[in-house]
Amino acid sequence: MEIGTTETQRAQREEEREAIAYFRSPVAIRECCGQIFTWVNEGHSRYFACDLKQLERVADYVIEVMRCEYPNLQIPFHSRWRHFAAGNVPRLTQLDTQLTGLTPLEKAAAKFDLAIVSVLLDAGAGDSWRYYEQETGLTLGRSEGLAIASFQMFCQGSFSSNNLLQVDALRLQTLTETELANGFQVNAKNPLVGISGRWQLLQKLGQVLVSLPDLFGYQNPRPGNLVNYLLSKSQNGQLTASTVFSAVLEGLSDIWPGRLEIAGVNLGDVWQYPSLETAQLLYSSLVPFHKLSQWLTYSLLEPLQELGLEITGLDALTGLPEYRNGGLCLDLGLISAKSPDILHSSHSVGSEVIVEWRALTVILLDRIAIAVREKLGMTAEELPLVKILQGGTWTAGRKIAAELRTGGKPPIKIESDGTVF
C-alpha cells in the first residue's frame, strides 16, 4: 500500500513539474491560444467572431505605418529602450555617459537593472496620468511617461541603497509606496492606475532577488546579476531568446500577486478558460500569455547584444497580447464583438472575454506577420516578429485607436491592477 502510494505521489509530482514547465513555454502560449482561436472560428464563442478576410487590409495598414515610422524598414526591437527616447531626447546617450568607467559587463548589468524595473512598472497608466520631465519640459503619458518616470528615478539612484546607477534588493524592500508615488508625480489630480500594485511588485522583486542567489547573486542581489547567469548559458557566442525568457519566468514568477498555482508554484500570467476544459486532460482549461515577461525578455536582448552575443530563435516568442495589438485587430475588423455590451462594459483581466481576446490576438499577430512579410518580400530572419510589433502592430494599434476614440482609449475597458497590461 505504501509503495503504491509513493509511486502515485512520485508520478503526480512529475506530472506537476511537466505542467509547470509546459505553461512557462512559448509553445504552450501558441498551442493554448490556438485552441481558443479554433473554438472561435468554429462559431462556439459567445463573445467574438473572426473575419480572416480582413487580414490583407490589416497587413496593408501595418505596412503603411511601418514605412511612415521607418522608411528604410530598419526597424529596432519592440522593447522598453524605444520609450526611453520619447520626445527624441537622447537619454540613452546620457545614460552611457553616466556609465563611463564601468566594464562592458557592469554596463550590461546596470541596463538590466533599469529595464527590469521599468518594465515591471509599465502596466497601463490610465487616461489621465501624466509625467512632467523637468529637464526637458516635456509632459508624457502612458508607456512613455512611465518609462521616463522610472528612468529618472533610476538615474537619481532611487532604486539603490547607495544612490548608484543600479537596483538592489535592500532598497526595493525598503522603498515605500509614497516614495514611488512621489517619483511618478502621483497625486489626487494626477492619479495613476494600480500604483499600489506596482509598489507591491517592486517589494516582491526585492524578496525574490534574495531568495534566488543562483540567478541574482549572493553578494548584493540585484536584477542585473542575471547577465552573469545568461552568459553561462550561452554557447559559441550565441544565446536563444527562449533561454532568456525561461530565466525571466524562473526568476520572477513569484512576484505576481494572486495568480494560479500548480503544486505551490506561481504560474504568473496564466488564466482559466473553462470552455477548453476536458475530463481527459489535467489543467486543460489553463491559458498562458506571459505578456510582461515576454516584453521584458525583448527588452533584455539589446544589452546582451551589446556584450557581443548573437540572439537566436527570436520568433519562438509570441506577439504581445495587450490592448494595442488586440485593439488593432478589433478596430480593423479582424475580430468583432458579438454584443455591444462587450465594448461598453468593464472587464477583469481574468474574465473569459479578456482571455479570449488576448488569445485571438496572439494567433492573429502571427498571421499578420506572415502577411506583412509576404507583401514586403522579406523573411522571418530579416523581419522577425519583435520588429513587426515595433514597426508595426503596436504603433498601428495606437494610431487607429487615436483616430476612432478620444484620447486613444482601447476598444475594450479592462480593470487593471497594474500588473498585467
Image: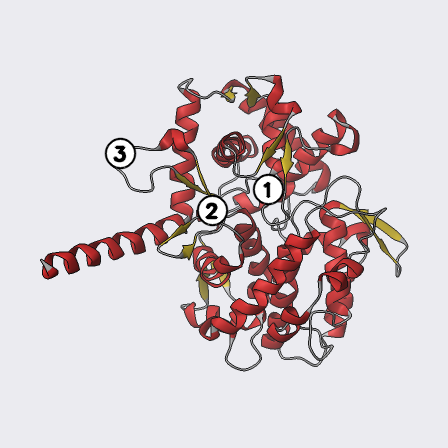
Q: Are discs 1 and 2 less than 8 Å apart at CB?
A: no
Residue at left 16%, top 60%?
6
Q: Which residue is mark 1?
A: 389
Give the left or right position of residue 294, taking residue 287 as reference. right
Q: Identify the residue at horizontal 42%, vertical 68% (top origin).
A: 233
Mark 3 and 2 residues: CB-CB less than 8 Å, in contact? Answer: no
Q: Nearer the viewer, residue 9 or 413?
A: 9
Residue positioned 15% across, 57% down in the render: 5
Whichever of callouts 3 and 1 sits on the residue coming sooner in the sequence is 3
The residue pinned by badge 3 equals: 279
Question: The residue under label 1 is which amino acid type?
Answer: Leu
Query: Spatial distance from mark 3 to mark 1, Cα to Cα?
Result: 37 Å
Q: Quadrant of the C terminus?
A: top right
Question: What residue is pinned by disc 2?
Answer: 315
Which residue occupies the foreground of this view, 358 or 265?
265
Task: Check if mark 3's residue and mark 1's residue have beta carbons within 8 Å.
Answer: no
